[in-house]
Image (cartoon, grey):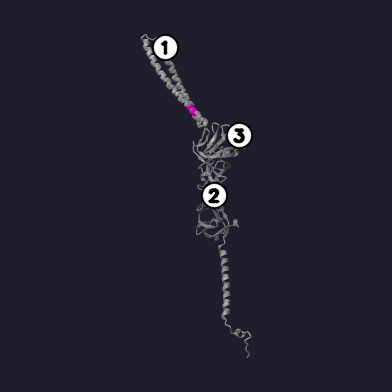
């Protein structure tokens, strides 16, 4: 048996455990650990896959309901035109002057007799003061003449008394009477002078009023044609530097429709005939109207006759000069038309379960299940009697896969 010398390193080979004597427990633990790790990874991956599949938005197609208005199916003629006001005025001044104040702007509502602008009236104010002074002078002249007249009357009476007593001559009496008559005439002249002074004052005041521009009727200011500091005149002049108009006002309560109808079809139009109007700016909005008048003359250049219609009710969205299309309704058949607007959908948008019909309304990224009342049409459509307003988007595909509140994506958004 060999012994190690103190100088040699220790031999650890004797401490090695023979593999035949090792315990199987540590090996099992390692396998269990790795199996657990792999199971957790697979479970997480499966969860992610299931989540992606379950929460992926369903791709669908959508349609918008068609709204058919009362009498739409009995249209006998269509025409295009514009919204025009019956009362529209460009306000100008009666005199030439410079604008010193302007109290309105485009879009402002004005009332009748409201002050719109003010012109420089310094000269007119001077004329008014002069006319008032002349009137006061005329009134003072009457007072002075009346005092002289009363004095001449007393003198005449004294001379008459002396004449009866033969103490005054006929000549003296005649002179006294003449003085009374002259002063009486002067009084009448002074009174006429007062009337003339009053007339001149009224004229000066009227001229002063002409420097204040007022609204002739209530309406909306649609155009401001002059500014403070500019000259305005009732007639054009000054090489184009003088304005003839200050503002333009439109009476919004007088808006009507003006269309040109081909003279070949004017026989289809009659006074009071009902019509359906659609503004170019709001193609989904149908506005009831009726014929107010047919202008009794034709345009030989365009071979048309002008027809004017009145809106049954006005709305702030209706503005002057808007383009509009008018459908004239058949008076003989309009009474058989539907009395309410009809909302039309394809049958493919309707799902029926246990006799209850419903649709899926698309609201941004989800759908809402909404019950509706329907009426079958002869074609492949249905009329929605209740449940929709006509402005919604309705799902038209994958109805069997849809549920209330489910996330969806329109096919056009791919």
- Find residue 93 and report its horizontal and vertical position in percent: 54, 33
SS at mark 2? strand
- Find residue 222 and report its horizontal and vertical position in percent: 55, 40
Of badges 1 and 2, the one in the foreground is 1
Which residue is tagged 1?
174
SS at mark 3? helix
Mark 3 Cα-neighbour bin, 10 Å: few <14, some 14–19, many ≥20: few
User: Which of the two labelled residues, at mark 1 and mark 2, occupies the earlier sequence position?
Assistant: 2
User: Which of the two labelled residues, at mark 2 and mark 3, occupies the earlier sequence position?
Assistant: 2
Indicate the quadrant containing the C terminus: top left, top right, bottom left or bottom right. Answer: bottom right
> Dividing the picture into quarters, in which one does residue 408 lie?
bottom right
Bounds of the magenta segment: 128-132
Judge whether 49 appears above or below 99 on screen. Answer: below
Report how many numbered discs are placed on residues in the image. Answer: 3
Query: Is any atom of residue 238 visible in this view?
Result: yes
Identity of the residue drawn at 41% across and 11% down = 172
Q: CA distance from mark 1 to mark 3?
A: 70 Å
Indicate the quadrant containing the N terminus: top left, top right, bottom left or bottom right. Answer: bottom right
Which residue is tagged 3?
240
Identity of the residue drawn at 56% across and 68% down = 44
User: Which of the two labelled residues, at mark 1 and mark 3, occupies the earlier sequence position?
Assistant: 1
Which residue is tagged 2?
67
């Amino acid at each position: 048996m060999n012994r190690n010398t103190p100088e040699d390193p220790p031999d650890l080979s004797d401490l090695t455990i023979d593999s035949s004597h090792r315990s199987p427990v540590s090996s099992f633990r390692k396998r269990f650990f790795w199996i657990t790790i792999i199971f957790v990874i697979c479970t997480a991956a499966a969860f992610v896959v299931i989540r992606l599949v379950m929460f992926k938005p369903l791709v669908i197609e959508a349609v918008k309901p068609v709204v058919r208005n009362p009498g739409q199916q009995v249209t006998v003629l269509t025409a295009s035109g514009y919204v025009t006001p019956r009362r529209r005025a460009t306000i100008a001044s009666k005199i030439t002057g410079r604008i010193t104040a302007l109290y309105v702007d485009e879009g402002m509502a004005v009332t009748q007799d409201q002050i719109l602008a003010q012109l420089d009236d310094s000269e007119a104010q001077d004329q008014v003061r002069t006319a008032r002074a002349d009137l006061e002078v005329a009134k003072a002249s009457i007072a002075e003449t009346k005092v002289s007249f009363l004095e001449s009357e007393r003198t005449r009476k004294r001379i008459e008394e002396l004449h009866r007593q033969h103490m005054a001559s006929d000549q003296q009496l005649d002179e006294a009477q003449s003085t009374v008559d002259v002063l009486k005439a002067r009084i009448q002249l002074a009174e006429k002078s007062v009337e003339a002074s009053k007339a001149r004052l009224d004229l000066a005041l009227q001229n002063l009023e002409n420097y204040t521009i007022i609204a002739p009727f209530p309406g909306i200011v649609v155009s401001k044609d002059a500014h403070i500091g500019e000259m305005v005149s009732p007639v054009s002049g000054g090489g184009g530097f003088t304005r003839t108009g200050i503002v333009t006002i439109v009476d919004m309560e007088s808006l009507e429709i003006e269309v040109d109808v081909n003279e070949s079809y004017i026989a289809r139009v009659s006074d009071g005939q009902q019509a359906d109007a659609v503004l170019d700016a709001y193609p989904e909005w149908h506005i009831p109207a009726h014929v107010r008048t047919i202008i009794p003359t034709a345009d030989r250049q365009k071979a048309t006759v002008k027809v004017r219609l009145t809106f049954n009710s006005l709305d702030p969205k209706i503005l002057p000069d808007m383009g509009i299309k008018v459908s004239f309704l058949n008076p003989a058949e309009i009474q058989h038309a539907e009395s309410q607007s009809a909302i039309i959908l394809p049958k493919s948008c309707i799902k029926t379960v246990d006799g209850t019909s419903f649709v899926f309304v698309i609201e941004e990224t989800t759908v809402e299940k909404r019950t509706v009342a329907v009426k079958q049409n002869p074609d492949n459509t249905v009329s929605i009697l209740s449940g929709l307003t006509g402005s919604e988007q309705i799902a038209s595909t994958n109805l069997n896969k849809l549920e209330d509140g489910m996330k969806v994506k329109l096919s056009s958004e791919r």
